[in-house]
Amino acid sequence: MNRNDAQKTPATFHVKSFGCQMNVYDGERMAEMLGTRGMTPAAEGAEADLVILNTCHIREKAVDKVYSDIGRLTREDGTRPMIAVAGCVAQAEGGEIQRRARNVDIVVGPQAYHRLPDLIDKAGRGEEAVDTDMPLASKFGALPARTRQARPTAFLTIMEGCDKFCTYCVVPYTRGAEISRSWSAILDEAKALVDGGVREITLLGQNVNAWTGEDDKGRTQGMDGLARELAKISDLKRIRYTTSHPNDMSDGLIAAHGDEPKLMPFLHLPVQSGNDRILKAMNRSHSVDSYLRIIERVREARPDIALSGDFIVGFPGESDAEFEDTLKIVDQVRYAQCYSFKYSPRPGTPAADMDHQIPAEVMDERLARLQALINQHQVTFNAATVGRTTDILLERKGRHPGQLIGKSPWLQSVVVTAPELAIGDMIDVDIISAGPNSLAGELSRRKAA
Ligand code: 5AD
Ligand code: SF4
């Protein structure tokens, strides 16, 4: 299958990111880098000369989707764009991809995408263009500074990788060991984002609260110190972070939730299961009780904090009673929202070789029950905000003329009709109604508490 001559030196590109927010962030950095090299993003609907599939390997279906996407990029006349597979599938299955999908031109892992321009040149010359290195020098130093953002919210990766080795998870293999970016690199990037119009930053890391570094005076700092320093940037109004590990919830970070107003009252703290035997088999290194104790302390510091979690159902050997314990913890914590997944055996992880893999029908049934319960708590949480006055940061247009959608401090989408306002405005609204997935608000005359 041939590409057009024009695509030997692609002029336009399109990045499609799957999976987690870190992939979204990486996709944006790739786009900015190609932009500074003179390439332009393809207009929506138009065909790009280069398509980058920025992939996720966390569960099976994500991988299948990539292969079907590669197939669909072939045009009616038999030509196709230059195709790059980036992200975690590229890292984990670089060789396999080339065998299975011969029409892939570039394979680039998540720690090597700063080298994309060279890889594009190589592919243009018809040479093999594969880079799944995990170089010691971070890619961040080689990427251009952040450019002006179209939205008032942005992600900022502050650490990457994972040393925890939960037995189900591919991340330690695809993203490598935990590495924190430097204090100054993070602050510089945050300032550039804020200068470019950003008002809310979400700090990212697979174990974001394990971030550690030295400040400009050589003192060791954790994520709480970093958040407090970021809060000094006056035009930065809100700080969020995700994803956290229970064992890295330090006293300082819990305290910061109580006294740093720019740190939003929202905590994504996955527990995965409500049963101690399963947590042990997952190598989570925390128990149900130690998790609940952390939640209690976070709530003491910030009583209105919204909690969010991740759950896996059907981990190998999970009995009915052990699954029921997961339902129990959902009731105990009363999460504002949650993500829940069927266990998916990942090649190379210890759990994939464990006995007593759970049949698909059992997983389906457990997932449906869990999701119904999670949904119930989400509805309750949203309903409890009706009647409150809160600030929202307007992020995008709504479906109807004059409608704008913003986020509450608790990460709920709030729809308001306010034609005189603009994306990026922070406003106070009275919440007048709530559904499972969004709230409706009216401009308030009161000031949010
Ligand atoms: N199967 C199902 N879910 C998984 N997750 C991670 N690995 C797997 C797997 N093998 C879920 C966890 C994690 C989230 C990002 O994805 O809940 O917190
Ligand atoms: Fe998926 Fe994990 Fe990679 Fe994110 S880090 S893209 S969740 S495999």
Image: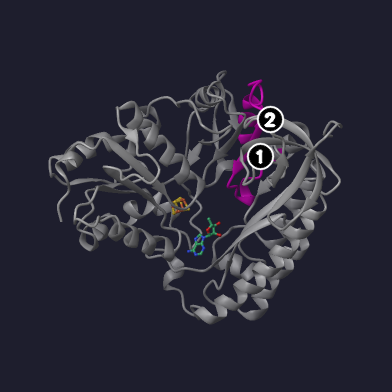
Whole-Å distance between the Cαs marked 1 and 2?
8 Å
Extreme-top residue of the structure: 217
Looking at the rendered image, the quarter that the C terminus falls into is top right
Please give the name of the residue rendered at 43% of the width and 65% of the height, measured from the top-left corner.
Answer: 61
Residue 5 spot, x, y in % from top left: 14, 41
Looking at the rendered image, the quarter that the N terminus falls into is bottom left
**What amino acid is found at the position of numbered circle 1 in the picture?**
Leu
Please give the name of the residue rendered at 70% of the width and 44% of the height, measured from the top-left corner.
Answer: 415
Is 61 situated left or right of 193 in this image? left
Residue 325 spot, x, y in % from top left: 70, 71
**In the image, the residue with mark 1 has its CB under 8 Å from the nearest atom of ligand 2:** no
Residue 421's label in the rendered image is: 2
Q: Earlier in the sequence, mark 1 or mark 2?
A: 1
Q: Residues within 10 Å of mark 1 (few under 14, many from 20)?
A: many
Extreme-front residue of the structure: 401
Callout 1 secondary element: strand
Callout 2 secondary element: loop
Is 399 situated left or right of 45 in this image? right
Please give the name of the residue rendered at 55% of the width and 68% of the height, measured from the top-left corner.
Answer: 281
The answer to whether residue 138 shows anywhere in this view is no
Is 331 situated left or right of 204 in this image? right
Please give the name of the residue rendered at 23% of the width and 53% of the height, measured from the top-left corner.
Answer: 104
In the rendered image, which quarter is residue 349 located in? Answer: bottom left
> Over which residues does the magenta segment extend?
223-251
> Mark 2 and mark 1 in contact (Cβ < 8 Å)?
yes
Q: Residues within 10 Å of mark 2 (few under 14, many from 20)?
A: some
Is residue 344 highlighted in magenta?
A: no
Badge 1 is on which residue?
404
